[in-house]
Image (spheres, helix red, strand yellow):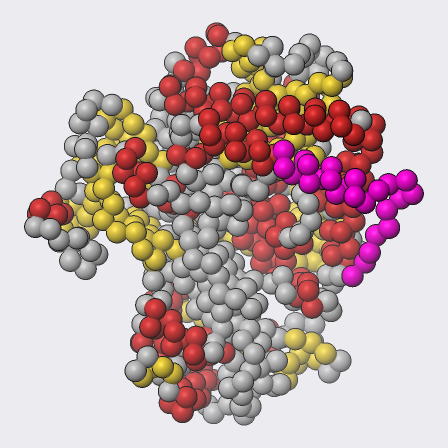
């Protein structure tokens, strides 16, 4: 590890005290927002961020809530600085913006409030708070508009420079315009005030810190913090092999048509710098899946920070070690009038997944064990959303943006299973709402909330499972539903022989017997609830009517596995069967583990795994894989003699790429994964979604799986 000596005259204790003070301030800002907001999106699910910036828009500190907002918050502050250049500013001013095209927002509901910070009459920084507000106008309640063909239909768009507070007082005419264009004005205005309260908290605490240390000293130490964070990240980049790494992901369904839209990236690593070039990505579309540039930056950071800067205090220095290039007019950097209201959770999430895969390819070749250990199964990134709007039986209008959509599984790690219901990679502090809270605030009754057993990416370490839940109306006769399930067909890859995770989706079970079961004192369950029809909804769909007696069922994607499933410890598979994570059939067919009386039968398991390896190759393997092979040891490694399989020692070849020296088998992804009990939505027309499997021809070890879209229709 590289160590850094502080420049002469700097005290390490003071450096750390100021750094931790800034982190504490942005966390306290978040607490102030939670305690003053009335929205469960903020209070229950933590869909917000808080940050402090210097006068030019460089990040002093950033809170650990939603990393997407790293990009959108930074772009918002920088664009505000440009928009109001030369205009008078005063303490107590606050500016509001939410337009993805001009203010960098991830999507219109993610609303920024930015306040200047003055010390002795001098501008010394900006306090920034951003949160998902429940409704921002537009054609669809909740701000997600699958039916929109342009950004003008999605929301009331606020560019940089709209002043919402002037010297501490609301700008009344701006407030009236805003509240006249949203469906829940009381909740909207209270949340705007909570963002202002968050900023005011940050301003007070930052000024107190500057008074304590002195302005010049504060500036010197924050500049040094930037430099040290950058040095640490660059040192780690330097331990990755130089090279050019390319890959692709695919965004599903733009709200109008069930098409696939390519997200391409070429990652170039030279010395201690990385460039991400998204040339080759699809052109912007007329659907709501276009990703704003602010969300693109945040999506790249969402993957880079936990891979390379997992223990680095986050500030501007972390961001300077990589560059991002994206062609204007593309799906990852659209121009008006492209709709954009779900771009961050669809295309943006694909960017995070793609960067993860590229970093996997790069890190696996490092000589540094710590860097190799940053490889992982891909997360089940992409939000599976449901927004309900209607009027209660008491006559109150409501909009429910159900934050249970954050219950997707994380990718498996080199030494651990992925986390169940972990959230997206960008959600550092993901929280799921309490059932009781949603039932108290909205006219819904939950019937079940459980793990989605058809979502795990199997492997030596298993990907995290997603969530599965259902509710019926309770206190309303009818609602209009908007849904989006952007991880339905092209699912999250595994790594090093780990299998992909399962997908997401929604069904409406029409005219069920839920009322009769409840009246009889029975608890409805998935296998006991009767329905006249089970309607599978489109990946993205709006204006779905749900009536009393219907049931909305939602299931959420899981993370990819890590390592060949045949390398998973039999005792862990047996525990999975006992705990209900996998069935005995999946244990036998996928893991080659025979479970008897709750324990793994060692002799039967050894025979079953030998038979599965023989089935993979169509012949008896020449090399035996020891039972004691470490989990996750299936990813090929290279030494002076060439490529080899760590699990068995079998040699693969001596070229630059081992893929041409192994056995490759291709299947339709949905059909193949169904054999392993994993649910993926099949495509019925257009591009096919395939899965390539690469096996060692000598030992039958599964070395790699890849979800791939066939370009031919």
Residue 312 at x, y = what percent?
Answer: 69, 49
Q: Is residue 149 magenta?
A: no
Q: Quadrant of the C terminus?
A: bottom left
Residue 72 at x, y = what percent?
Answer: 58, 34
Residue range (magenta): 1-25
Classify 166 as above or below 602: above
Viewer-proximal residue, 96 or 569?
Answer: 569
Q: Is residue 8 magenta?
A: yes
Name the residue located 47 percent from the left edge and 42 percent from the top edge.
Answer: 345
Residue 399 at x, y = what percent?
Answer: 32, 30
Name the residue located 47 percent from the left edge and 38 percent from the top edge.
Answer: 46
* Camera sees residue 645: yes
**Left or right of 477, for residue 175:** right
Residue found farthest to the top: 173
Residue found farthest to the right: 8
* Camera sees residue 108: no
Classify 457 as above or below 235: below
**Left or right of 139, for residue 290:** right
**Left or right of 416, for residue 552:** left
Q: Quadrant of the N terminus?
A: bottom right
Name the residue located 42 percent from the left edge and 53 percent from the top edge.
Answer: 421
**Count of all numbered marks drawn on residues in the image:** 0
Quarter-wise, where is residue 30 in the image?
top right
Quarter-wise, where is residue 329 in the image?
top right
Name the residue located 41 percent from the left edge and 38 percent from the top edge.
Answer: 44
Classify 187 as above or below 239: above
């Amino acid at each position: 590890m590289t160590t850094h000596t502080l420049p002469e005259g700097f005290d390490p204790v003071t450096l750390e005290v100021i750094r931790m003070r800034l982190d504490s301030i942005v966390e306290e800002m978040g607490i102030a927002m939670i305690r003053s907001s009335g929205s469960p999106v903020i209070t229950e699910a933590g869909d917000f961020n808080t940050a402090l910036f210097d006068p030019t828009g460089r990040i002093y500190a950033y809170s650990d809530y939603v990393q997407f907002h790293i990009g959108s918050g930074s772009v918002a502050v920088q664009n505000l600085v440009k928009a109001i250049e030369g205009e008078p500013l005063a303490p107590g001013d606050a500016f509001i913006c939410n337009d993805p095209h001009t203010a960098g927002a991830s999507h219109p509901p993610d609303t920024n409030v930015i306040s200047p910070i003055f010390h002795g009459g001098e501008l010394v920084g900006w306090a920034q708070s951003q949160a998902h507000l429940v409704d921002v106008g537009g054609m669809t309640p909740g701000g997600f508009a699958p039916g929109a063909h342009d950004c003008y239909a999605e929301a009331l768009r606020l560019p940089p420079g709209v002043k919402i507070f002037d010297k501490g007082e609301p700008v009344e005419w701006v407030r009236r315009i805003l509240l006249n264009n949203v469906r829940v004005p009381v909740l909207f205005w209270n949340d705007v005030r909570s963002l202002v309260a968050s900023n005011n908290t940050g301003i007070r605490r930052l000024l107190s810190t500057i008074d304590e240390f002195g302005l010049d000293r504060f500036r010197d130490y924050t500049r040094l913090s930037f430099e040290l964070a950058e040095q640490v990240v660059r040192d780690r980049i330097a331990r990755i092999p130089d090279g050019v790494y390319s890959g692709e992901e695919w965004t599903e369904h733009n709200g109008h048509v069930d098409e696939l839209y390519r997200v391409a990236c070429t990652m170039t690593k030279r010395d201690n710098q990385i460039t991400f070039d998204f040339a080759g990505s699809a052109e912007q579309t007329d659907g709501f899946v276009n990703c704003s540039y602010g969300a693109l930056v945040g999506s790249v950071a969402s993957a880079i920070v936990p891979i390379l800067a997992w223990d680095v205090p986050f500030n501007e220095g972390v961001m300077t070690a990589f560059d991002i290039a994206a062609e204007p007019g593309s799906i990852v950097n659209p121009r008006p009038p492209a709709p954009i209201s779900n771009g961050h959770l669809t295309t943006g999430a694909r960017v995070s997944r793609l960067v993860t895969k590229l970093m996997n390819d790069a890190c696996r070749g490092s000589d540094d064990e710590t860097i190799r250990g940053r490889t992982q199964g891909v997360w089940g990134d992409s939000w599976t959303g449901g927004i309900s709007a209607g009027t209660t039986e008491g006559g109150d209008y409501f909009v429910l943006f159900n934050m249970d959509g954050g219950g997707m599984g994380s990718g498996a790690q080199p030494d651990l299973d992925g986390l169940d219901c972990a959230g997206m990679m960008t959600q550092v502090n993901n929280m799921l709402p309490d059932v009781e809270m949603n039932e108290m605030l909205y006219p819904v009754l939950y019937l079940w909330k459980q793990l989605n057993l058809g979502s795990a990416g199997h492997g030596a370490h298993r990907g995290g499972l997603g969530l599965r839940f259902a509710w019926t109306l309770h206190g309303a006769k009818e609602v209009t539903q908007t849904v989006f399930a952007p991880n339905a067909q092209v699912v999250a890859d595994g790594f090093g022989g780990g299998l992909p995770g399962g997908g997401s989706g929604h069904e409406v079970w029409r005219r069920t017997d839920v009322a009769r079961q409840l009246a009889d004192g029975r608890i409805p369950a998935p296998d006991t609830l009767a329905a006249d029809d089970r309607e599978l909804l489109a990946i993205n769909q709006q204006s779905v009517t749900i009536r009393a007696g219907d049931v909305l069922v939602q299931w959420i994607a899981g993370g990819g596995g890590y390592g060949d499933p045949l390398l998973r410890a039999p005792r862990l598979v047996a525990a999975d069967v006992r705990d209900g994570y996998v069935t005995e059939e999946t244990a036998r067919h996928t893991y080659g583990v025979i479970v008897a009386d709750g324990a793994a039968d060692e002799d039967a398991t050894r025979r079953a795994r030998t038979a599965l390896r023989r089935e993979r190759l169509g012949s008896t393997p020449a090399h035996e894989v020891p039972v004691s092979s470490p989990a996750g040891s299936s990813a090929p490694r290279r030494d002076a003699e060439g490529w080899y399989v760590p699990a068995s020692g079998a040699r693969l070849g001596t070229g630059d790429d081992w893929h041409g020296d192994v056995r490759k088998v291709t299947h339709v992804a949905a059909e193949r994964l169904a054999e392993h009990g994993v649910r993926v939505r099949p495509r019925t027309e257009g591009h096919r979604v395939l899965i390539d499997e690469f096996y060692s021809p000598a030992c039958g070890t599964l070395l790699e799986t890849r979800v791939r879209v066939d370009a031919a229709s």
